[in-house]
Image: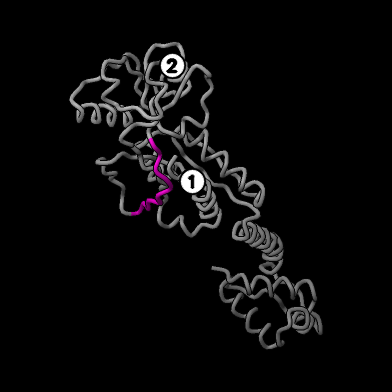
Amino acid sequence: MFDTRHIRTFHAVVTAGSYSAAARALGYTQPAITQQIKALERVVGSPLFVRAGSRMRLTEAGEALTRHAETILDSLTAAQQQMSSLTRLRAGRVRVCAFPSASATLIPEALARLAADHPGVRVELLEGEPPESIRRLVRGECDITLAFTYPGLHEQVPEEVVELRLMEDQLTVLMPTGHPLARRRAVKLADLAEERWIAGCLRCRTNFLHECAELGFAPDIAFTTDDNLVVQSLVAEGLGVAMMPGLVLSFLRHDKITGRALDPASRRQVSAYVLREHLRVPATALVLDELKAVAARRIGC
């Protein structure tokens, strides 16, 4: 294996024309230059220079190494510059996998903050619902996963995955604006037992069915969809009501919909998941900090 210090010294000798000139250029003593060239020759297995009177001449091995030395040193310089950019947050890429309502709320705010101070850090967005989104993290398909869980649902995560709690997201009921219960500030789930329902993703649907069962009724689920905008459209047309996360209220697009909190309150936990070793990656840590800052302003949402 070549020692890059020896390659740099060899290149300096070739460029300067002598050991003494290379020593002056590098700030070394001449014996130190001699020792490094001898060490490099031992690795190569052949002399690199021969004396021709008072001058030095490259051997065939020396000429071959000369052709590679500049490329090696240029590559090292480029690598050092890139590493410096990454560690000083002038560059970097972070892949974030998030569920839809986080992608529509937390993510844009965090990325706007990031772009203002660190425009060189690029974020690649992926969409996924838990638990598959956490499996994508473990498979190396993303660097950060935003996922949610409900009370009583223990999230099984591998030992190498760290959970960073961001916020509690209060559940709400979406109903047509003209619904009799829309005049209330909060509604009881039991009061909606006779309604037709629109259910969301599998994890949300499972929690919804559990909460209804706790109250002694089985809901009439007329439609199921993972698309929050589709849910809103169905509710707006009076085709049912829906239990949705509070984050969804941030991007309601139908004036014919009213959102009301549940009484008693029901919440889900929103967390960021990251591989333990990635916590030391500067760009990843920065994105996590921005997500925590944005989520902190939404606590109790």
Residue at image location 29% in from the left, 26% down from the top: 189
Tell whether 220 sits left or right of 229. left
Is residue 92 placed above or below 195 in the rendered structure?
below
Q: Main secondary structure of the magenta part?
A: strand
Give the residue at mark 1: 295
Residue sitting nearer the eye, 210 or 189:
189
Where disc 2 sits, the SS reads: strand
- Of badges 2 and 1, the one in the foreground is 2
Region rendered in magenta = 160-170
Name which residue type carries label 1: Ala
Residue sitting nearer the eye, 194 or 183:
183
Is residue 192 placed above or below 98 in the rendered structure?
above
Tell whether 40 sits left or right of 58. left
Name which residue type carries label 2: Pro
Q: CA distance from mark 2 to mark 1?
A: 29 Å
Colour option used: one colour
Is residue 216 placed above or below 164 in the rendered structure?
above
Q: Quadrant of residue 16?
A: bottom right
Q: Tell me where residue 295 appears, x and y as whole percent.
A: 48, 46
Binning the other alpha carbons within 10 Å of mark 1 as few (below 14), some (14 to 19) or many (20 upward) gives many
Give the residue at mark 2: 176
| Extreme-left residue of the structure | 216
Q: Tell me where residue 257 appears, x and y as whole percent.
A: 47, 19
